[in-house]
Image: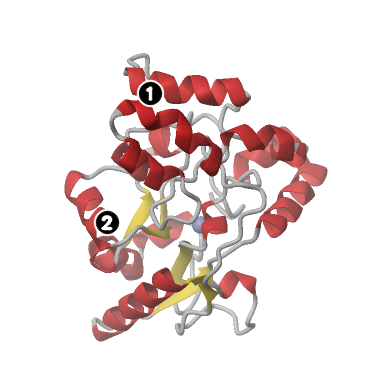
Amino acid sequence: MNSKLSPLKLAIMLTIMAALFVGCGDKAAKGPQSLAPQTAAAKGSTETATGKSKVKAAATDAQSITVLVNKEFALPDDYKPKDLVYPDVRFTFNEKIEKRMMRKEAAKALEEMFTAAKKDKIYLAGVSAYRSHSTQTKLFNRYVKKDGEAKAKTYSAVPGHSEHETGLSIDVSGSDGKCAAESCFGDTKEAAWLAKHATEYGFIIRYPEGKQAITGYKYEPWHIRYVGKEIAADIAKRDITLEEYYNAIPVSAQKGTGDSGKKK
Ligand SMILES: [Zn+2]
């Protein structure tokens, strides 16, 4: 944990602690009521005195394409993106199911990006995109039942805290599905292409290498998040994370290795 806290960081931290101390934001199994005070929507009002209220509003508005969701910041329990569509790109499966969906703007950007990749002879495929709150809840509860809550939290995101619930994130692999959502994906040419070009389409590699202490996640070269071209370019240029972009507190890194349960 970083011992140097700015007043802003402290304010955010106190808010979170007041809501409930959550280590890695992990407490799902039974927590709708405890989640509520720290939902994205609820946190917006706490930061108006910082002089960065406009930026903070974008970070805490669940509807915003720039919303910040991590192990500290949750989406409201009842949040469901209003504009989910099926992006017209290849996936590693054929079914028209929930995890194929993304919010409209992100879906369009994804289509453009996959098309551009193809021109470079890089054939990408979606692995998993949107995940509803209820799906995440079922998933997490199943893991809790199987391994106990403490262990479940090391490999699965607590409901409300998975960025996949925003409809703005997607796990991507090569079209052969090799190393899908696994660390070996980092060594593929598809990962190299994404790292180089994703920001041109408004996506960031959400959990970069060496930033686990800030994002709370190990390096996930396959997990990209749509934030829009402007912010993506800024984040890439400054080599920072979305947390740093918002000057939010680092997410404690000791727990949790990922959000899909497939990490290594
Ligand atoms: Zn992911």
Mark 1 touches mark 2? (CB < 8 Å): no
Q: Describe residue 116's horizontal placement relative to residue 218 as left or right.
A: left
Q: Quadrant of the N terminus?
A: top left
Question: What is the quadrant of residue 6 in the picture?
Answer: top left
- Alpha carbon distance from label 1 to label 2: 23 Å
Instruction: Evaluate whether residue 52 shows in this view.
Output: yes
Which of discs 1 and 2 lies nearer the camera? The answer is: 1
Residue 154 placement (x, y as % from top left): 61, 39
Q: Few, some or many C-alpha atoms within 10 Å of disc 1 (few <14, some 14-19, many ≥20)?
A: some
Q: Amino acid at mark 2?
A: Ala
Residue 67 placement (x, y as % from top left): 43, 50
Q: Residue at point 38% right, 23% down?
A: 9
- Reading the image, the residue beneath label 1 is 9
Can you say whether 54 is above or below 20 in the image? below
Q: Describe residue 55's horizontal placement relative to residue 59 as left or right.
A: left
Label located before the other in sequence (1 or 2): 1
Q: Residue at point 37% right, 39% down?
A: 56
Circle 2 — which element? helix
Instruction: Evaluate whether residue 210 shows in this view.
Output: no
Q: Residue at point 60% right, 27% down?
A: 22
In the displayed image of the protein, which residue is found farthest to the right? 145
- Reading the image, the residue beneath label 2 is 232
Q: Describe residue 87's horizontal placement relative to residue 190 as left or right.
A: right
Question: What is the quadrant of residue 195 in the picture?
Answer: bottom left
In the displayed image of the protein, which residue is found farthest to the left? 237
Residue nearest the observer in this picture, 263 or 74: 74
